[in-house]
Image (tube, rainbow, N blue to C red):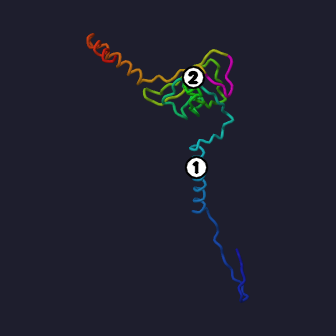
């Protein structure tokens, strides 16, 4: 209770209400939770890696990485062990170099084969490792040269249709087509 004196000399007593768990406290807690959720989203959507001590990076050379994107998963036996962080063209401009961020829990052997595969028939591309038998492991920053590039379904279908179409023509039509092409 607070007391105060008035100018006339008599004492005036004022009462302040007792604080309760009110709407202000609920709004404050909600604001705190919203602020924490917004901070979490900013960190994750921004791609900031706060746990980089548990990862290491390897590079892999491929002839073709069509359809592979940054953030694609890296798997062994169907278990995610990392992700693709960069896709660049090699200095020779003949091959693509991808950078893989892998967890420290899994070590890649020097004879493992990195393959680009598709999830489902027309799904996303990812990097799959086929395990080797070597007892020596790659170190952070090493490059994987044992790779298999993308199997492009469109190329296979195109070759099949082209070959199938050329076999159906009679011999004299083939000769006419060949003479026109020359």
> Whole-Å distance between the Cαs marked 1 and 2?
37 Å
Q: Position of residue 61 (x, y in %)?
A: 58, 24
Disc 2 marks which residue?
114
| Residue at 65% over, 19% down | 110
Asked if the magenta segment contains residue 163, the reply would be no
Residue 140 occupies quadrant: top right
Look at the numbered disc 2 and give the secondary structure of its residue.
strand
Residue 136 occupies quadrant: top right
Tell whether 9 sits left or right of 111: right
Q: Position of residue 44 (x, y in %)?
A: 58, 43
Residue 37 got which mark? 1
Vertical arrangement, residue 170 with respect to residue 106, above or below? above
103 and 72: which is toward the camera? 72
Vertical arrangement, residue 129 with respect to residue 50, above or below? above
Extreme residue toward the front, this view: 182
Q: Position of residue 145 (x, y in %)?
A: 60, 21
Which quadrant of the rendered structure holds the C terminus? top left
143 and 73: which is toward the camera? 143
| Crowding at mark 1 (Cα within 10 Å: few <14, some 14-19, many 20+) | few
Q: Please provide the residue range marked out in magenta.
A: 135-144
Sequence-wise first label, 1 or 2: 1
């Amino acid at each position: 209770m607070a007391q105060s004196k008035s100018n006339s000399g008599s004492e005036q007593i004022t009462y302040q209400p007792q604080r309760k768990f009110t709407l202000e406290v609920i709004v404050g807690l909600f604001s705190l939770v919203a602020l924490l959720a917004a901070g979490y989203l900013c960190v994750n959507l921004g791609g900031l890696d706060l746990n980089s001590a548990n990862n290491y990076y390897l590079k892999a050379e491929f002839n073709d990485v069509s359809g592979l994107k940054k953030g694609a998963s890296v798997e062994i036996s169907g278990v995610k062990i990392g992700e693709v962080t960069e896709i660049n063209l090699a200095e020779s401009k003949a091959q693509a170099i991808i950078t893989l961020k892998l967890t420290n829990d899994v070590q890649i052997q020097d004879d493992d084969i990195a393959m680009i595969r598709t999830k489902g028939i027309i799904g996303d591309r990812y990097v799959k490792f086929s395990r080797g038998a070597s007892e020596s492991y790659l170190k952070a920053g090493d490059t994987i040269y044992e790779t298999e590039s993308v199997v492009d379904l469109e190329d296979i279908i195109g070759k099949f249709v082209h070959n199938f179409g050329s076999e159906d023509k009679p011999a004299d039509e083939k000769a006419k087509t060949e003479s026109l092409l020359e």
